Image (cartoon, grey):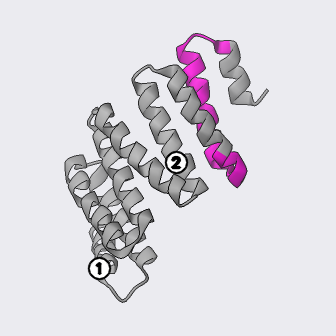
Amino acid sequence: MATTNQDSLYTVWQNDSLNDSVRVDAYNKYVWQGFLFSKPDSAFFLAKNLITFGAEFGCPRATALGYNTQGVSRSLRGNFVEALHYYIKYEGIYARIEDKRGLAKSHNNIANVYYSQGEYPKALKYYTKSLEAYQYLNDEKGIATVLNNIGNIYSEQGDLKMHCCIIIGA
């Protein structure tokens, strides 16, 4: 069944009579579900199709999703410097088109890289930006995720009092 779903997603991507947004979402799912976590290098390569599509058809969201996938691919391989490069491109596109949800996600991804590198002040800066965007959107799941990430920084630093305050919202 998973193969059938992958085939269906790819068929949607190839159908140029469909709305660009539908095609982009299908292809993004195709890459994430079929390749990103099992074959991150293949996902990196496949994400270039989103970037090219975005440039050719004036669809910045496609380009942003492509850069995000490339960032995740590099992050999964432990190449945080390259991952950050792609996440910053992703962030720039969403800033330009004023997409709060995209910005919230990109800020969280950038913060995750800094967290992985032990650069906690930079991570906190980007987690805070992400939190503000999720609060603006009233996205409780996003807010909870970012608060957990912030709490992890305080826990790593041995500040369990602050960790507990973040986690319980005190």
Residue lying at the far right of the rendered structure? 170
The N terminus, quarter of image: bottom left
Give the quadrant of residue 86. Answer: top left
Q: Is residue 124 at least partly visible in the picture? A: yes
Query: Is 170 colored magenta in this rendering?
Result: no
Foreground label between 1 and 2: 2
Q: Position of residue 44 (x, y in %)?
A: 25, 52
Q: Residue 140 magenta-drawn?
A: yes
| Residue 161 point in image, percent of width and height | 70, 14
Q: Nearer the viewer, residue 33 or 64?
A: 64
Q: Name the residue carrying label 1.
A: 11
Give the magenta-colored segment's residue range.
Answer: 133-160
In the structure shown, which secondary structural element does the residue marked by tag 1 occupy?
helix
Q: Residue sitting at 26 percent across and 55 percent down?
A: 35
Residue appearing at x 73%, y 23% in the figure = 165
Establish if 84 lies above or below 94: above
Query: Closer to the camera, 111 or 40?
Result: 111
Q: Amino acid at mark 1?
A: Thr
Which residue is at the front of the view, 148 or 60? Answer: 60
Residue 129 in percent (x, y) is at: 61, 39
Q: Residue furthest top?
A: 158
> What is the three-letter code of the residue carrying label 2?
Lys
Residue tagged by mark 2? 105
Instruction: Describe the element under mark 2 as helix, strand or loop.
Output: helix
Is residue 1 visible from the viewing direction of this image?
no
